[in-house]
Image: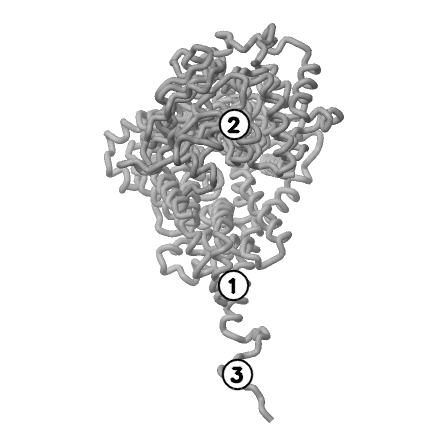
Amino acid sequence: MRPEPPVDRFKLRRRPPSERWIDSGFRSLTILLASTVAIVLVGIFLVVFQGAQDAIKAFGLTFLTTSSWNPVTGEYGAFTAIYGTLVSSLLALLIAVPLGVGTAIFITENLIPTRWRDIIGVMVELLAAIPSVVLGLWAIFVMEPILRPFLNFLHASLGWFPLFSTTPKGPGMAPAILILVVMILPIITAISRDALNQVPTALRQGAYGVGSTRWIAIFNVILPAAISAIIGGVMLALGRAMGETMAVTMIIGNSTNFSWSLLAPGNTISAMLANQFGESSGIQVSALLYAALILMLLTFTVNILAQWIVKKLSLRY
Amino acid sequence: MTMTMPRKTPAITNQSCLSLEKVTISYGSFEAVRDVYLEIPRGKVTAFIGPSGCGKSTVLRGLNRMNDLIEGCTLKGRVIFDGQDIYAPEVDPVEVRRRIGMVFQQPNPFPKSIYENIAFGARINGFTGDMDELVESSLRKAFIWDETKDKLKESGNSLSGGQQQRLCIARAIAIEPEVILMDEPCSALDPISTLKIEELMHELKKTFSIVIVTHNMQQAVRVSDQTAFFNAEAVEGGTGKVGYLVEFDETERIFNSPLQQATQDYVTGRFG
Amino acid sequence: MTTLTPAIKHSSLCLNPSLRRNRLDRLFTTIAGGFSLIAVLPLFLVLIYVILQGGRLISINLFTQLPPAPGLDGGGIGNALIGTFVVTLVASLIAIPVGVGGGIFLAEYSKSGPFAQFIRLGNDILAGVPSIICGVFVYGAIVATRVFFGQSYTAAAGGMALAILMLPTVIKTTDEGLRLVPKALSMGAIGVGASKFVTITRITLPSAFTPIATGVVLGIARAAGETAPLIFTALFSPFWPEGVFNPIATMSVLIYNFAIMPFDAQNELAWAASFVLVVLILGANLLARWLRRFASM
């Protein structure tokens, strides 16, 4: 039989109420803090939606298709900015995807010694850390002057084509697209690298085991296995490109006049917000918030799509 | 084989320390173990044996409400400890665990020093005495003082697997619980460490009531006074097997003259 | 004389570089290598120019003087340097407690409940909200309503905008970091009668310190370089900081403002500020990298 201990030396064997209050209080606190996310998200939507009301009433859906932006007459249409947002981000994607996926393959598929792979990986990650505004500064003073002769050449030889129909005069859509490439390249590379690293070794060995050359294995077995995660990453990068503000604002030229040409100054929704929001009033603020609402819906859709694609992948492995 | 109600256990005359009344534990809608009646005696070692998936570990974790941490796990019935149903709504599960300690299958020392591993539990239980003395006596009781006395400041993770498990036992006995639950404490250990822990259990039962889940029948014979045999069987309309208590008696009788055929088959290795 | 001739004529096992498949292999490898080169080229070009253009301007005056009036020479970025620290500090003071708390809820209290799933989704959406929209939100909610003592543009508002930007990173790294802690560890604490609060604060959270710290440092580094949320919340100021309830200069906004000015002195200060900012941010990134390495040992 167990002898009862004469005195219990553990005075908290019975929990005092204070300890219980701390326990349940802490739980409630974390719930409250987690809810902040939802509150902020709803708050962002409400502030933007509320502010956009006047413009929505005044311009309706024609706001999306007209390109006049005239504070004097009070007429606003966001077509130039919407076109600029979509074209700049999609063209940037077109350039960045092959570069990013190619780099990811180069640093995951045992083509070069591990040391070099790590170094390239680290450098691409550090590129992602460079602030947008510094890239903008660099674009203005370094990239654009270097690029100018090349753009002039494009205009001279392909000027009949609408996309190259204007004379390059400094800031414009083309340099903005290139700086966007620099900004989304690290995202695409990083996500593709993770996706390729997650491809099971057994699958790789299987491909090499039946006598595939390296690139036959990459194209036929490894890339298909990683493709949904890579597409998810590309969608995230697209969302990033559409919302990117500073570097684009500094180099795109911020023109409210519509032009098909990539060599002409253009505009994006975020650039327009950065440029005008602080100094506007009345219906112009509302028109800007209407544009912001469109930008939010665009990035929201793209991001949800990206989540959905990535989730599909996690079910497969 | 039929689902018979386990017989009452008149052989047990000792005062019981934990009693289970019609306990059914489910994960979501899946019943893991059904209608268990059990009287766990005080001051003895009680072993739970049975094939995999029979719910013996689930029942063990139900004894100090560790199942609360598993999402969707619910218990019906009553578990009486110290005259109180520990599943009553007003009961604080944390207090239950301060009186019913637990040792887990995998050694899980905290990433702290050996000293702090022992002192942590004592401190949160409001220990009022001399901490150095408590640490030493707990480590001594767990037969690990000699190996650790010169490196109390070192991390608990620096010990071998068997030593870590004895440290975890020392951690459990430091808070002087009334019952210690052991969930296959030797399954991750080598034979020599296993032997040490079995010796340790013989010492510990002088002070504590012990309930141990084991896969190893020889171990049950060596260490326990009472043995409960659980089995699982498919039920109509169910998705998986449901565990139930077949027989509970003195260890010696379970292994030599069990009343149920299923027990006989299991302990003689003719099971399956 | 009998020679054993194999039934099928096998080619030699030596590598034949002129085979079509081997030529294609080399071609693709070269292309991928070329792409990698292009991918790392911008980092070099940016760093070289930032070092050449900005590094040469580093002097004591740069850190101790105010920016010059337009058209004048000299001056420094002292106020912007302090401002960046102030605004980032405000952001961290908000985002770290809120984010770590929210992450604890997700990882420890409700792993798969509907509310937690909703918060996780919301967090992913918030992470995708363009930073300029964060600025617009804080402008609408705080600057335009003048909630801070009737002040419109304030350092506090800028800090809050950056905090919204940091929050998703902190929540995600806390959530993931805590879930990496072995369940057995918290079981051990609960088994000796520790309450949930004690288990989390004394066992689980310290075990997850390194991944959380890494994520937080990266989040801070990103916030310190952000401009878009600040241009109409913290605004800018040509003067020394006057507390958190006044407009404040930051290095990122200074770079933006001064880059598009037609004055050499301002352009130079933009380069100098870029140099300082890049050094700070890359330093923080290397710190995070070191933390991670330190943890894996």
Residue A32: where, in percent of width, then height?
42, 19
- Counting other residues with Cα less than 10 Å from the Cα at mark 2, is it few (<14), some (14-19), or many (20 or more)? many
Question: In this orientation, which residue lies closer to the viewer: C50 or A36?
Answer: A36
Q: Which residue is mark 3?
A: C6
The kind of residue tagged 3 is Pro
Residue B149 in the image: above or below residue A175:
above
Query: Which secondary structure lies at badge 3?
Result: loop
Question: In this orientation, which residue lies closer to the viewer: B176 or C247?
Answer: B176
- Counting other residues with Cα less than 10 Å from the Cα at mark 1, is it few (<14), some (14-19), or many (20 or more)? many
Question: In this orientation, which residue lies closer to the viewer: A73 or A11?
Answer: A11
Residue C9: where, in percent of width, then height?
51, 82
Q: Nearer the viewer, mark 1 or mark 2?
A: 2
The kind of residue tagged 2 is Ile
C-alpha separation, residue under disc 1 versus residue under disc 3: 29 Å
Q: Quadrant of residue C69?
A: top right
Residue A214: numbered disc: 1
Residue B59: where, in percent of width, then height?
43, 26
**In this rendering, position of residue A156 left or right of residue C284:** left
Q: Quadrant of residue A268?
A: top left
Q: Nearer the viewer, mark 1 or mark 3?
A: 3
